[in-house]
Image: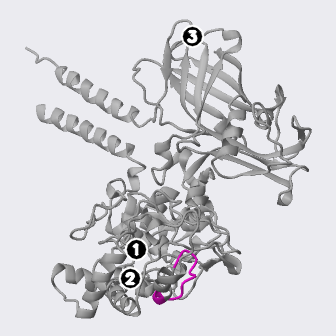
Amino acid sequence: MNQKPNRLPYFFMIPVLVSIMASTSSCQKDVKNEFTGQETNLTIKFTPVVRYDTARMYFDTTTYTNVWNESFVVTSFKFYIRAIRLSNSNTGKAFEIAADKYFLVDFKDSLSTLVKVGVLPSNYNRLSFILGVDSTHNVSGAQTDALDPAKGMFWAWNTGYIFAKFEGTSPSSTAPGKRFTYHIGGFKTGEDVNKEIQLLFPFGTGVNMEGGKTAEINVTADVYDWFSTPHDIKISKLNSIMTAGTEAKQVADNYSKMFTVMTAKTE
Amino acid sequence: MTVRWTILISLFITLGAILVQACKKSGNDKGADPTPISFNIPQGWPSPHYDFSGNPLTQEGFELGRKLFYDGRLSKDGNFPCASCHQQFAAFSTFDHPLSHGFDNQFTLRNAPGLYNIAWQPATHWDGGITNLEVQPLAPITAPNEMAEDINNVLEKLKQDSQYPALFRAAFGDAAINSQRMLRALTQFVGSMISANSKYDRMKKGTAQFNSDEQTGYAIFQSKCTGCHTEPLFTDNSFRNTGITVDPTNKDYGRMNITRKPEDSLKFKVPSLRNVALTAPYGHDGRFLSISQILEHYNSGVQNGPTTDPLVKNKIPLSINDKFYLLLFLRTLTDSSFITDKRFGPPE
């Protein structure tokens, strides 16, 4: 007449343990999306180049020449991206990560050039994102993380973010220290330079991104593109842009074509 | 038996609760919750423009902001706290300085405005360049001719300080010091500066009476000035060209610097007239040394240009008597309790 061992309470324990595990895993900050299965861990790796996608850009020491035959050295190159979207132009499948998740890609901070996101597993052949900061985030007061004004991408005297920054020196510049300073931004009607960047994977070939696996997309950003097409930007004529407006719009038109997907692969 | 399991289960639940707690921002050094303080909108005033719901006003947040406001370390050489240009006895303007000055003996282009009822302003600065009160301090802190400092340097100084980490913890729950918290604390302090206890306010409430001269001045004011200096804040927060010419040295075109629109050339924000007797000199660059000079400007000095405001284009005729009564009325806008309120003075 042995009593049944105390098994039942163990069953009671299970939901308790599960809830504890659930609460601890909620500590991890994940990119929010509606997908609840296993994500693909995607890294978008940005690399700065000059003129050729294989010609890596180096800061401070290497001299380059732009399309106007002006030589220049790069001292700063950074920009904001948001609304990262993967899609497949053949199947119509698309996945967008949280639109208010901002990334500051700063080529002087190598960690920031690796944009890591979780994506819905699928076959994709396109990547798109917006280079810029939406109007809401431009006027929402003191913010943190990528949008922390301490990151140096904020106009303190005329509230708004600098979306993209490209600085350097050039013998063609008439500014003190031969500097050129291109701070590009603008979110108000008529001067909005938010740019949606649409990129196709090499040859439009789809890549199967599976759950639990890792994927990598290599994207180059070419400073050469800032100086021309469609607008002629010469350091000798224009060495500083530090406000939204016509010139910022021209430069943003130019740089909106500076990205190329070099490789897209899974491991 | 059951008792034992109950104990075990409750132990697990407690453990779970602790873990959940630990998920809340680095919770292990969590202090007591800060003490909320209420933001009281004076009777008959509109709702403020700045929304404190995203930056709840607390005693600890206010006190942290107060310490920051009076702390020279927010500036490059330690000499220029916010309070260097915003002096309480002058209703937080700069006493007797046409232009405020900052780092390395440099002058700025502008007259430091008084700070009061700022929470009602849709945009700050003479040119309205700042559209959210929280980010306003970034401008003077980083301007090379004002406090001339870098935000990261300021934060570093605060982190190295013996007191700040504890004050940040008291205000925000943990000792993390970042730009958002610093800016929000400053906003709690400056945004709480309400001036609504002048003789004019007491007259409106029925606890004081204007004498006949003040009453006459008030009537003249209502007939000639409220087009821009709207009660109860004594500004409509618009940008206008009051018939001034550009200063040839400073070449400050005001609102146009922000909007880049030629129609905004030489437009500056209509300042509140509260505490006006304390905030001389006047105008965006302090070019008017006295209230009388401004009144005379409207009477005879208006220069018509392409952007001159229609309300002043034909001047505002003011007799000697009008000016006398207006002056007496404007003095009723002085709020003595505001400029002596210890809450806004330097921390002990």
Q: Which chain letter matches label 2?
A: B
Between marks 1 and 3, how big is the CA–CA gap? 58 Å
Q: In this view, does B135 lie to the left or right of B13?
A: right
Instruction: Tell me the kind of residue under disc 2.
Output: Asn
Query: What's the residue type where badge 1 is placed?
Result: Ser
Q: How many numbered tags mark residues here?
A: 3
Q: Main secondary structure of the magenta part?
A: loop
Name the image quarter holding residue B30. Answer: bottom left
Name the kind of residue labelled 3 in the image. Answer: Ser
Residue indicated by mark 1? B272
Horizontal and vertical percent position of residue B57: 33, 63
Mark 3, secondary structure of its residue: loop
Find out whether the residues at labels 2 and 1 contact each other: C-beta distance under 8 Å: yes
Mark 2 falls on what kind of element? loop
Q: Which colour scheme is used?
A: one colour
User: Magenta span covers which residues?
Assistant: B283-292
Q: Where does label 2 land, which residue?
A: B275
Query: Is residue A224 or residue A254 the one in the foreground?
Result: A254
Whether B288 is among the magenta residues is yes
* Image depth: mark 2 or mark 3 in front: 2
In the picture, the disc for residue A89 is 3
CA separation, marks 2 and 3?
65 Å
Name the spot of residue B341 as percent of width and height, x first: 34, 83
Is B46 situated left or right of B285 in this image?
left
The C terminus of chain B sits in image quarter:
bottom left
